Amino acid sequence: MLRRLAARTFWSLSRWRLSTAPAPDRPTVLVGAPHTSNWDFALMLGITWRLDMDIRWLGKHSLFTGWRGPLMRALGGIPVDRSNAGRVVDEVLELVRSGEVFGLVVTPDGTRGGHTHWKSGFYRIARESGMPVTLGYVDRTTMTTGLGPTLEMTGDVHADMDRIRAFYADKAGFRPDLRVEPRLREETQRV
């Protein structure tokens, strides 16, 4: 496959080290974090392509305008209209329920700055679809990237996020100064 060959070439030439872990054995919500630069997302795609994972990903709708639209969709992109972000969760769940099988790459820290919490869509999608959450990471301090553990979300938001926070505690993105602590506004409520 062309994607896998491109990824293999990229990883052989990159100064980043890919910490290879086996790909999840079933569809998963793949969290790409910390998301501090567009390069973080490119590295996440490189991981999924190297592991030959069938993925879709969420991106702001402006990435899908003009000539970029067909390219972004061909790469697995699903446009997100931020003015109606709640609808995105419903659309992804409709794809899952229709029988489409894919992993979903989500960057819950959102827009790479200017906020204090992660967006909870990844959690809601995981809980409502029954998909686990796989923790993908980029760590500039060690120049490594890869996949961490795959976790089942229990519905205890605070406890689930504690496990996620523990994993990401020593990870910094491409631009560490823009890192957002893994925390949901809903941690004190039910999601």
Image (cartoon, grey):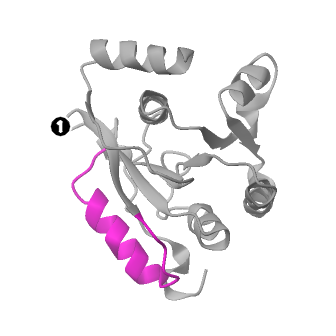
Place residue 144 in its image quadrant: top left
Location of residue 138 with respect to 18 vertically, above or below: below
Q: Is residue 161 left or right of residue 114?
A: left
Asked if the magenta segment contains residue 155, the reply would be yes
Q: Quadrant of residue 60?
A: top right
Say which of 150 and 121 sits in front. Answer: 150
In the drawing, does residue 21 fall left or right of residue 47?
left
Q: Against 162, is 29 above or below?
A: above
* Residue at x 35%, y 44% (from the top left corner): 22
Q: Secondary structure at mark 1?
A: loop
Q: Which residues are magenta?
A: 151-172
Q: Is residue 15 above or below residue 140?
A: above
Instruction: Name the foreground residue: 188 vs 9.
Output: 9
The extreme front residue here reads 25
- Work out whether residue 114 can be spotted: no
Q: Which residue is mark 1?
A: 142
